[in-house]
Image: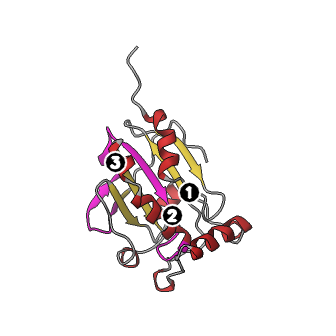
Amino acid sequence: MTYLSSAAPDIHGVTISGRSIRLSDFRGKKVLVKFHRFSGCPVARRQLMDFIANYRELQARGYETLILLVSPAARIIPVYREVPGLHIIGDADRRFYRAYDIPFSWARTFSPASWREIFRSFVRGYLPLFRRFGTVLNGMPGDFLVDTGGCIVEQHYGGHAGDSWTVADVVSRDVRLQAPTAS
């Protein structure tokens, strides 16, 4: 589904640090909404740890980031820690995944591209955390850039388990989020 130039569906949840949060709370700021698989997924862990390690660059550009995982908060908390400007929400019932039309696909989960990403994660030391698996194992990543007015200006639906934007990918798209100039 294409959401470009339309209002981003609101997200209202509780972060893993216990803070009630809404996407609409960030009106006037640039927001990245990231959907990942589940907290025990080696690919999601590798990508999110890399993302968190490089997050300062987005923070310096004024971004707030919402990361959603198909896991209950109790399974996320031992794996991740929030940093300023980065908010992690468990969406075990997939309410927000459905609102953004994030795909769930066994074919993509077991595609050669997904297996490459799984092995890359294994080599980097990210093995499956079976006790941290989510409620659904076949979710795909998705990324949405929301402008200061609350509209989606860029979107990306992952074609396989590891197809998610990095900090560098977001920075390269940042120019699209600049406030329009008055004519």
Place of residue 66 in the rendered image (x, y in percent of width and height, measured from the top left): 39, 56
Residue 112: horizontal and vertical position, in percent? 73, 68
Name the secondary structure under disc 2: helix
- Drawn side of residue 68 relative to residue 158, left or right: left
Q: Are marks 2 and 1 in contact (CB under 8 Å)?
A: yes
- Real-space Cα distance between discs 3 and 2? 18 Å
Disc 3 designates what residue?
Answer: 59
Circle 1: residue type: Ser
Q: Which residues are magenta?
A: 13-42
Residue at image location 53% in from the left, 47% down from the top: 169
Residue at point 50% right, 55% down? Answer: 99
Mark before the other along the chain sequence, 2 or 1: 2
Q: Residues within 10 Å of mark 1 (few under 14, many from 20)?
A: many
Which residue is at the front of the view, 155 or 12?
Answer: 155
Disc 3: CA contacts within 10 A as few (<14), some (14-19) or many (>=20) = some
Which residue in the structure is indicated by mark 1?
164
Of 77 and 122, the residue lying toward us = 122
Residue type (three-letter) at the residue carrying disc 3: Gln
Mark 1 secondary-structure assignment = loop
How far is the residue under mark 3 from the one under mark 1?
19 Å
Q: Would residue 25 be counted in the magenta stretch?
A: yes
Residue 126: x and y in percent read 52, 76
Q: Quadrant of the C terminus?
A: top left
Question: Which dot, 3 or 1, sits closer to the camera?
Answer: 3
Residue at the spot of label 2? 47
Q: Which residue reaches farthest bottom?
A: 131
- Residue at the image position 44 percent from the left and 65 percent from the top: 49
Who comes first in sequence, dot 3 or dot 1? 3
Residue 123 horizontal side relative to residue 145, left or right: right
- Name which residue type carries label 2: Gln
Q: Residues within 10 Å of mark 2 (few under 14, many from 20)?
A: some
Horizontal and vertical percent position of residue 30: 38, 41
